[in-house]
Image (cartoon, rainbow, N blue to C red):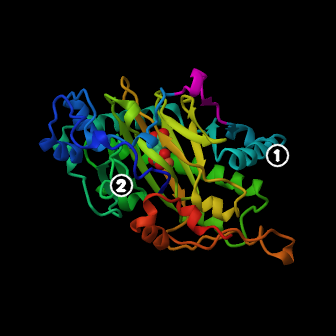
Amino acid sequence: MAIVGLAKNGDLSQQHGKSRGALVDDDDAADYCLKGVRHLSDAGITRLPGRYVLPALDRPGRSIGAAAGGSPARVKLPVVDLARLRVPTERAAVLSTLYTACRDYGFFQVVNHGVDSEAIAGMLDVAARFFELPFPERARHMSPDVRAPVRYGTSFNQANDAVLCWRDFLKLSCAPTLRDVVPSWPDSPADLREVAASYAEANRRVFVDVVEAALEALGIGDGEDGVMEELATAGSQMMTVNCYPACPQPELTLGMPPHSDYGFLTLVLQDDVEGLQVMHGGEWLTVDPVPGSFVVNVGDHFEIYSNGRYKSVLHRVRVNSTRPRISVASFHSVGVERVVGPAAELIGEERGGEQRRYMDTDFATFLAYLASAEGKHKNFLQSRRLA
Ligand SMILES: O=C(O)CCC(=O)C(=O)O
Ligand SMILES: [Fe+2]
C-alpha cells in the first residue's frame, strides 16, 4: 500500500499536549498509543490524544457523508452480479459493467457471490470477539516483522506514522497455503482459526471468479504469460481484520489515511457501519454498505497489468463517535517473486497495441519504496509510471 497526499505542515497546535484526553495525560500517552485505539476507547477518553490529530489540511472535516453545503456525498458503487455472470446470455453485459467500473471508479460491489451468509456473519462476529479480548491476549501477536504470518498492531504503519490512525488490526497471511499458516494464527477466540480459514477459502474462490472475469473483460483471457493460472493456484493472499472503535473527535483523525492497495484485487467485507470513502471526480464519496456484499477494488498491480485501463484508486476510512466498525480486507495478487508489467496482449506496436505506460515492478521494489522517505507521501504507482 502507498500512502499519499498527507500534508507535512499545517496546524500542528494540537500535537503538543494541548489536546490531552480526559483519562490520558501526556506522559502516559505514548504508551497508550502503542497499545492501540481499542485500549484508548476502553479507557473512556473524551478528547483525542495529540498523536492522532491530523494537520488541518488532512482532516476529514465535515461530517461523514456530507459534502460542502450539506448535500450528501455518497456513492452506490456499480454492482457486479456473479450469478448473472454464470448465465451465458448475460455474461457479456456483466463483463461490460465490470470493465466500466474498473475504469471509472476502480471500485465495485459484488453480490450473489456464493459465500453463504453464515460464513460472512461468522467472520465479522469472530473478528469483533478477537478485539474484545483483554489487551495482553491480543498483544501476544504483536510483531515488528512485517512478514510474520500473523501480526497484531495499530495505526497504518506504526513504526513510521508521524500521526497515528484510529485503527487496530490483525493481519493473517493465507499463503503459501492455509494449511501452512493457520497453526500460527491466534488460538483465541477458540473458533477463530476455523471460522477465518473457511472464510479465507471462500473469499479466494470469489476472487478467482472476479479476476477471471476482469481479465476476460480486458480481452486477455487466461493471459499468454500464465497470469490467470498463477492467480488461481499460486497467488498471494493476505487478510487484514480492521477494528475502528468509536472515536471521541472523529473530525480530527482517520481510521486509515488515503492510500491505494498494492495487489491485483482487494475484497472488503464491512459490517453495517459506513466509513470507507473512495476518491472519485476529485471528491471523497462514502460507500453505502450493502449487507452481505463484497466491496472490491483494483490494486496497483492490476492497474499496471492492464496498462492503466483499470484504475487503482485512493481510498480512506473515516471513523465516527458512536459506532465501532469492523472490516475484513482480503488482498490477492500474484506470488511475491513475480515481476508485474503491462500484459503483452495490450502493448507493442507490432500487435497494433498501445504504448507501455508502466515499468515492470516486483515486491522487493515496493518494500524498498515504502522504506524510503518518498514512500510516506507519494503514490507508489506514480513512481512506476512512464512519462
Ligand atoms: O476498512 C475498510 O473499509 C477498508 C480497509 C482498507 O482500505 C485496507 O485495509 O486497505
Ligand atoms: Fe485499502
Q: Outermost residue, left direction?
A: 27
- Quarter of the image for residue 372 reads bottom left
The spot of residue 169 in percent (x, y) is 34, 46
Say whether residue 69 is magenta: yes
Front in this rendered view, residue 260 or 5: 5
In this rendering, does residue 189 appear at all? no
Front in this rendered view, residue 337 or 256: 256
Look at the numbered disc 2 and give the secondary structure of its residue.
loop
Highlighted magenta segment, given as a residue range: 65-77
- The reply to whether the residue tagged 1 has its Cβ within 8 angstroms of ligand 2 is no
- The reply to whether the residue tagged 2 has its Cβ within 8 angstroms of ligand 1 is no
Between the C-alphas of marks 2 and 1, the distance is 41 Å
The relative height of residue 307 versus residue 171 in the rendered view (above or below) is: below
User: What residue would you read off at disc 2?
Assistant: 157
Q: Earlier in the sequence, mark 2 or mark 1?
A: 1
Instruction: Please tell me which residue is depicted at 19% across the width and 47% down the height of the picture.
Output: 30
Say whether residue 333 is magenta: no
Instruction: Please tell me which residue is depicted at 43% across the width and 71% down the height of the picture.
Output: 368
User: What residue would you read off at disc 1?
Assistant: 92
Q: What secondary structure is the stretch in magenta mostly built from?
A: loop
